[in-house]
Image: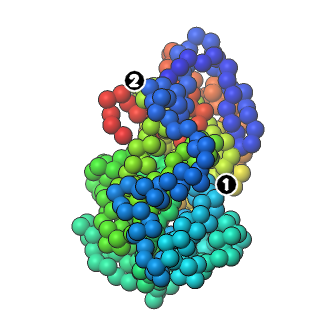
Amino acid sequence: MSRVPAEFDLKYGDITVAVSVPEGLRTTVLSPGVGANSAGSGAPLTDPLLALEDSLRNPIGSPPLCEVVRPGDRVVVLVSDITRLWIRTSDFMAPILDHLNRAGVPDSRISICVAMGSHRKMTLDEIRRIVGDMAYERVSVFQHDIDDENGFVYLGKTSRGTPVWVNRRVMEHDRILMTGGIVHHAMAGYGGGRKSVLPGIASRDTIKANHLWVLDPDKVGIRPGVGSAKTLGNPLHEDMVDAAAMVAPDFIVNVVTDSQGWFAGFFSGHWLEAWQAGCKLVDRMYCVPIDHKVEMVIAACGRYPRDISMYQASKSFYNAWMALKPGGTLVLLVEAREGGGGEEFFKWFRYPDIESCYEALKSDFTVAGYLAFLTRYIASVVRTVIVTDMDSNLVRTMGVIPAPTVREAVETGLSWAGHDPEILVMPEAGITLPILHGETP
């Protein structure tokens, strides 16, 4: 944490807006690379393709990819959907295909599966953007279809009783190669890794049973152990690991990117061990230590598309909340040019109170529903004012106060925060995770 002047700039969509607070208030900034972790932040790779090749030849916890596959194997490569375009799969898919070719696996024996979980189907143009034109032309590409009743095979139950149904077509291949990107994730601890299986290629019933582990079973709230950078004791994550172990993927290639979207590291090898190594880099880059929680946070998601919708802004809600004292005040900038991020998001605010929303979510869990519940829950424990382009009446249904300008939002926040509040400014709240000193992410 470092001192900032009373005036500073925050990103709002594609523009920058000026923000000011009264002089004399204790105001500090929290951003990736600021503080004790700055020396461990990942720098952009100078030669990403060389780094990729090195990771394939010298993987973590696994023989090299060329030894994992055998000549003539049928290989399927799992890729993330259009919502994870930041992974830049198109930049490294063709080199992976080339590597498989050199190992004796021709393009005719390789397929790519878009492991979209319960997300909508992709258009052909979107699939090309995901995998790249060259890969799209070379190999067969298909999408996971969560609504294909005959498209699943049953593998058994996890230790927590989740029935594991996964894509039959994927399981018919000799080798399964997972790709993806690692970031902090408010439900599973981290993205990437085992999420290529669950929810990536899982059935709707499997996904719902797994995702219910995020809800506290005894009261309205989030189950203990669930949250960003949390895996030990996180039942959602541990259930995903059980499911992935049943599928037994043969190899993984996961990436970590910096705040500007450049590759910071490739992590290849064993589907769990290599992913765990990537999680450590994510922590070094994006976990920022704080001495204590504060009375007020002024936050921006970072830039478009991190504030493209309220759905995406839920990450910023969560991260800012991690720096606030109970009953604190949050001022958040969210352009939300795409509104809620789909029709479903705001449907979850039709319930008259958070208790009824919680009960409905237990009965019919969806990710959009949970993120709506999460923002509503945060707004119930910290006072929140939002600057957004969205209709103010719709914003109020979230339990937050809309403000037409940043100045009015800050004034409202200060009126709530009490005398001489300590203020934390988070310019990149979408990727900045505050961690109290002494806590281990």
Find residue 242 and report its image quarter.
bottom left
Above or below, comparing residue 404 to residue 261 in the picture: above
Q: Residue at x 39, y 48 (%)?
A: 277
Q: Residues within 10 Å of mark 1 (few under 14, many from 20)?
A: many
Q: Which residue is mark 2?
A: 291
Mark 1 vs 2: CB contact within 8 A = no
User: Nearest the camera: 174 or 276?
Assistant: 174
Residue 175, image x and y in percent? 42, 75
Q: Earlier in the sequence, mark 1 or mark 2?
A: 2
Decide if residue 119 is in sight here: no
Q: How many marks?
A: 2
Q: Position of residue 8 (x, y in %)?
A: 67, 23
Task: Classify 10 Å Cα crowding around label 2: few (below 14), some (14-19), many (20 and above).
Answer: few
Please state if 262 lies on the left or on the right of 162 as rendered: right
The extreme top residue here reads 24
| Left or right of residue 192: residue 402 | right
Residue at x 27%, y 51% (from the top left corner): 233
Q: Residue at x 60, y 18 (%)?
A: 4
Q: Position of residue 343 (x, y in %)?
A: 62, 64
The type of colouring in the image is: rainbow
Dot 2: element: loop
Nearest to the observer: residue 227 or residue 115: 115
Which residue has dot 1 on it?
Answer: 339
Examine the rendered structure and indicate whether residue 159 appears above or below residue 417: below
Q: Which element type, helix, strand or loop, lies under badge 1?
A: loop
Q: Residue at x 54, y 45 (%)?
A: 264
Q: Left or right: 6 with respect to 72?
A: right
Residue 322's label in the rendered image is: none
